[in-house]
Amino acid sequence: MNVRRRQKSLEARKAEHAEITDPSLVLAAALRYLEARPRSTSEVRRRLLIRGYRADLVDGCLERLLDLGVLDDEAFARTWVESRDRARPRGERALRSELRGKGIDRQVVDEILETRSTEQPAADAEAARRVLERHARALDRIADPRERRNRAYALLARNGFDPETAANAARER
């Protein structure tokens, strides 16, 4: 019963949003969405359209946010990669996939990751080492060294590291 009520409520709100003609209300909704964390332009567009706001108002809102500098996909991508490197290291393939999922242009992603590899040549190797450190206790429980290396390699592959980086890090472990 609660699910039906919530569904009707969502549909009612969506219908209300479709009738809005004041761009400041769409802008306010976008800013509320951006309060939690930085977002890409594509994420904000998707969110506003899903909520039922008119496409012309959404486009105007996004233009305004871009003009004000609130939305900047390049800065967002750079921040995302830096955050991942600090908190939850991922390989370059995983970072590319995540940024594509966020709607970041391929050229911007290439530029950011190239800058990362130029400024920090061993960024992927260091990230792989940190992933293995995080899972060291589980890996240490595996008695057979070959099986331990295989599990470490698989863990790194799942986290988006290229085969060479994964193999080197697993061997060093």
Image: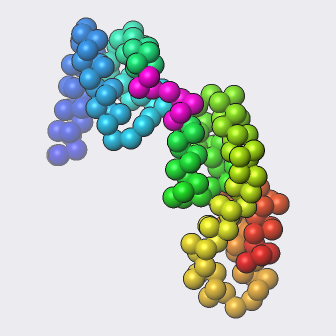
- Magenta-drawn segment: 69-76
Q: Looking at the image, is 158 positioned above or below residue 14?
A: below
Q: Point out the residue furthest to the bottom here.
A: 143
Q: Is residue 142 left or right of residue 55?
A: right
Residue at 45 percent across and 26 percent down: it is 71
Total marks in image: 0
x, y (%) of residue 98? 58, 43
x, y (%) of residue 124? 71, 56
In the picture, which quadrant includes the C terminus? Answer: bottom right
Residue at 42 percent across and 37 percent down: it is 38
Q: Is residue 13 left or right of residue 102?
A: left
x, y (%) of residue 74? 57, 30
Residue 14 or 93: which is nearer the viewer? Answer: 93
Residue 71 or 14: which is nearer the viewer? Answer: 71
Instruction: Tell me where residue 168 sits by quadrant.
Output: bottom right
Instruction: Tell me where residue 162 sits by quadrant.
Output: bottom right
Residue at 38 percent across and 41 percent down: it is 37
- Residue 161 seen in render: no
- Residue 132 seen in render: yes
Residue at 20 percent across and 39 percent down: it is 6
Q: Looking at the image, is 30 positioned above or below residue 89?
A: above
Instruction: Tell me where residue 161 sits by quadrant.
Output: bottom right
Colour basis: rainbow
Residue 111 is covered by the magenta coloring: no
Q: Looking at the image, is 31 positioned above or below residue 3?
A: above
x, y (%) of residue 167? 80, 67
